Amino acid sequence: MLRVVNKSFTRSYAVASNPILYTRKGEQPKASPHVVSSVSQSNSGVKIATQDDLGPVSTLAVVINAGSRNEDLNFPGVAHFLKNTLIRNIKGDNIVRTIREAELRGNSLYTSHTRESLIVATDFLRDDLLPYSVDAVPLLINNVLNNAFEPYEFLDTRNLVIEETEAALHVPSVLVANSLHRVAFRSGLGNSIFAPTETIHNLKRSHLAEFTNEHFTADNFAVVGSGVNQKELSQLVEDSLKNFTLKPKFLGQTKATKYYGGEERFNSGSSEAHFAIAFPSASFNSKEYAASLVLRALLDGSRRVSWGSLSGSSSLLSAAATAHTSVSAFNSAYTDAGLFGLYIKGTASDVKQVAQKAVDVLKSVANGTGFSDISVARAKNTVIVDSEVGVTRETKVHDMAVKVLSTGTFPKFADLLEDVSKVTSEDLISLAKTLVKNKPSVVSYGKSALLPYYEDLKL
């Protein structure tokens, strides 16, 4: 049991290789709980990663390198389709029983997909780890590796996918983000994350089977646990995989990402306008990644408080916003590429001036002006806080899996602290210079006659 004292003291985090020390008054434990991070590999080559913080809730996820970037351009939407078929009837079991049992235990069971991954996961109480995991690990693996796409399930899923696509792309921010990737990368990471409604009827069960047969290989496969014991999970995974024969390696080739840039415009009668401008940025495997996180926090003050300007009050971009139009920064990082940009939302007549002022702020950072050591320190604190408390468990296990699959290991929180602490003003200046020298990717949504083209902006 941790001893609690009521006095000023030095607190040491057990997760860091070199303890991070600070002094604070008040009642708190002498040391944080120990976090055990482990990575191993099953006999078949599947990566198994855990981060055990001894907390009360556990999360298990199977993550496969088979997102929308991996789709054949002739058959787009396979990843989106598969996301909706990863939990289904399997031989000797019934989907109704599976869902009902999860509900009775108070657990969650869900699937999702990204541009690079397919995910099927479950959350449950740690006290149920062994009795539930005996069921959960086979449940996840059996559903992922069961390629028998029944005709009735396929047809039901098609209708669901069409509904999801139409609903998602009716949300302006989702439409803009999806289009921004297409403008920036065209194919690969530029593939739509949603199955196109105009081509989805061309998909057949055989296309799903071909996709899974090609991409569901041991080197593309990771089982990740948060709040799970590594030894226990490894044994459960080994036992579950005995019933399957996985191909050891992906024999195809994932095309390297190439950045293009350009512009796409959506005309709408909506009174609200959306305008995004982005530049090629750092992948999460690059040494510039930490700097991109700090730069975003330096520019962006949104999400810090629940009142006042949506652009925040302490960020560099706050001066670019108006009473009715906000601007924020975003940073999307992938295994071999990234997008860093500015997002303007509000009154169409304000967009041009807000966008120009926002670009000028980014250019000022590139010139080494407009920010101070104090603002950089604040940005670093923001990155650390957001990385620890602003990320869902689903996102954490997914990030762990993607990193494990691409590098064989995943960074600990202490590693992020160290990388962020090393970011200097010169690093931010260098990154900003690299961003603005590239052709931008621009997507606008709203009354097109009132919205600027990227040539109208002084970049």
Image (tube, rainbow, N blue to C red):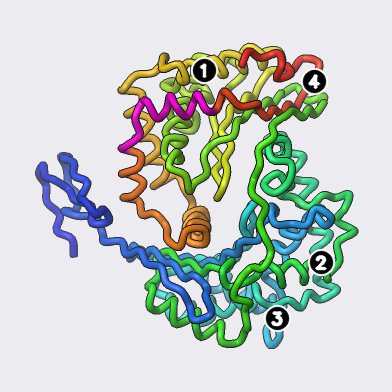
Mark 1 or 3: in front is 1
How far apart in space, not on screen, are marks 1 and 4 (Cα)?
A: 26 Å
Give the mark nearest the N terminus, 1 or 2.
Answer: 2
- Which residue has dot 4 on it? 448
Give the mark nearest the N terminus, 4 or 2.
Answer: 2
- Which residue has dot 2 on it? 207
Which label is found at residue 363?
Answer: 1
Q: Residues within 10 Å of mark 2 (few under 14, many from 20)?
A: some
How far apart in space, not on screen, are marks 1 and 2 (Cα)?
A: 47 Å
Q: Residues within 10 Å of mark 1 (few under 14, many from 20)?
A: many
Residue at 51% x, 17% y: name it. Answer: 363
Residue at 59% x, 34% y: name it. Answer: 280
- Residue 394: within the magenta? no
Q: Residues within 10 Å of mark 3 (few under 14, many from 20)?
A: some
In the picture, measured across the screen, residue 25 lies left or right of residue 441, that is left
How far apart in space, not on screen, are marks 1 and 3 (Cα)?
A: 56 Å
Q: In the displayed structure, would residue 2 be above or below residue 147?
A: above
Mark 4 or 2: in front is 2
How far apart in space, not on screen, are marks 4 and 2 (Cα)?
A: 38 Å
- Which residue has dot 3 on it? 90
Q: Residues within 10 Å of mark 4 (few under 14, many from 20)?
A: some
Tell me which segment is drawn in magenta.
421-434
Is disc 4 placed on a helix, strand or loop? helix
Q: In the displayed structure, would residue 349 be above or below residue 402?
A: above
Amino acid type shown at disc 4: Ser
Amino acid type shown at disc 3: Ile
Residue 385 occupies which quadrant of the picture? top left
In the picture, measured across the screen, residue 443 lies left or right of residue 427, that is right
